[in-house]
Image (spheres, rainbow, N blue to C red):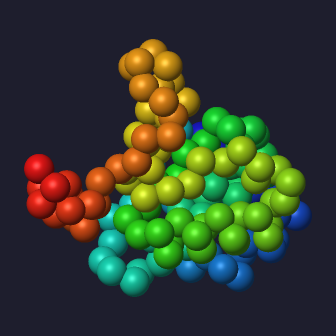
Amino acid sequence: MDNVLTRPLSHLKVRLEPQVKEREWKLVFSDALAILGVAGPRSGKTRALTCRAARVLDEELPARDLMLVTFTNKDAEGMEARLTHLLKPRSDGLWIGIFHAPGARLLRQNADLLDRTPSFTILDEGNNAALIRAV
């Protein structure tokens, strides 16, 4: 594999470069299919993941084939907004959500296989308590 740090920069890479810290550079521009970025809170993991997604979408992958998963709705919304800004319309069809959201999406898309309707709801703590009181 060639050195990602010495490759010529695409138009998008030039736009991303100021957003990517030196320690994130290899994570964002690596050609590896799977990567692991381990860092503490508020260290830039979500930003680095978003920049990597932008790079991969810009260079090779259709948006429908990429799924981004994070811990909070706020992070998911931020990732979606940044990718839409960088890549619109190439970000159309991208899967972005918190950890349980991709599972719910897959279940909705295949609800007929489970003899269910795709309009099911997921119980949260408040719904759970109301259901228990009703029973």
Return the x and y of residue 64 as percentages of the image width and height: 68, 38
Return the x and y of residue 100 as percentages of the image width and height: 37, 50
User: Looking at the image, which residue is at 69% across and 71% down?
Assistant: 81
User: Looking at the image, which residue is at 84% across and 59% down?
Assistant: 88
Given residues 94 and 44, the one toward you in this image is: 94
Return the x and y of residue 73 as percentages of the image width and height: 47, 69
Q: Is residue 9 visible?
A: no
Given residues 32 and 102, the one toward you in this image is: 102
> Would residue 20 appear left or right of 106 to someone viewing this image?
right
Q: Residue furthest front?
A: 134
**Which picture quadrant has residue 14?**
bottom right
User: Looking at the image, which residue is at 86% across and 54% down?
Assistant: 89
Given residues 2 and 60, the one toward you in this image is: 60
Quarter occupied by the N terminus: top right
Q: Is residue 118 visible?
A: yes
Return the x and y of residue 26 as percentages of the image width and height: 54, 61
> Would residue 43 appear left or right of 81 to someone viewing this image?
left
Please say if 26 is above or below 15: above
> Would residue 32 appear left or right of 128 to someone viewing this image?
right
Number of marks in the image?
A: 0
Given residues 105 and 48, the one toward you in this image is: 105
Please say if 26 is above or below 2: below
User: Looking at the image, which residue is at 71% across and 44% down?
Assistant: 93
